[in-house]
Image (tube, rainbow, N blue to C red):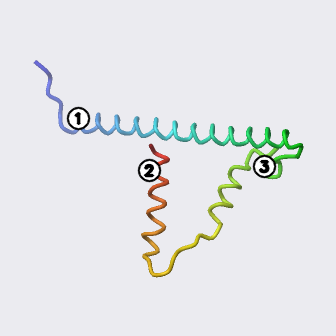
Amino acid sequence: MGVLKHPVLEFIDIFVFFIKGLLINIVLMLASTLIIAALTLVERKFLSLVQRRVGPNFVGYRGRLQYLADALKLLAKGSLIPEGINNFLFVSTVSLACGVCYFF
């Protein structure tokens, strides 16, 4: 016969399990983001060698922060929002779609 646990202890077990899963997911997402950033830098360096040009070396040490500069440039660009629509809905659906794609 199984031992009954106190509801508080059972809640703590579930909470710890949830936090462990959340931390593992955060670490995996950060690792995949860093891997993608490194592959982007390698691709840019390779293409610069093929095209006989310098490549990205202006941001950070030898271009290591170029992906952040590209992301900031993309976010700072103006977006075309049609007139007569709900601006919040127009922007939030794109953000929601990008977030879902990132997490899955």
Question: Distance between the Cα atoms at labels 2 and 3?
Answer: 30 Å
Q: Amino acid at mark 2?
A: Val
Instruction: State the image quarter where residue 14 is shown.
Output: top left
User: For the point 48% across and 67% down, which residue is it?
Assistant: 91
Instruction: State the image quarter where residue 2 is shown.
Output: top left
As rendered, which of 9 and 54 lies closer to the eye? Answer: 54
Q: Name the front one of labels 2 and 3.
A: 2
Q: Secondary structure at mark 1?
A: helix
Name the residue carrying label 1.
Answer: 10
Report x, y in % for residue 19. Answer: 39, 39
Determine which of the numbered discs, if any, sits on residue 100 in the image: 2
Q: Residue furthest left?
A: 1
First in sequence: mark 1 or mark 2? 1
User: For the point 25% across and 39% down, which residue is it?
Assistant: 11
First in sequence: mark 2 or mark 3? 3
- Quadrant that contains the N terminus: top left
Report x, y in % for residue 94. Answer: 48, 61
User: For the point 44% across and 77% down, which residue is it?
Assistant: 85
Q: Is residue 93 above or below residue 27?
A: below
Q: Residues within 10 Å of mark 2 (few under 14, many from 20)?
A: few
As rendered, which of 12 and 41 lies closer to the eye? Answer: 41
Question: Distance between the Cα atoms at labels 1 and 2?
Answer: 31 Å
Marker count (numbered): 3
Q: Name the front one of labels 3 and 1.
A: 3
Name the residue carrying label 3.
Answer: 60
User: For the point 49% across and 41% down, which residue is it?
Assistant: 26
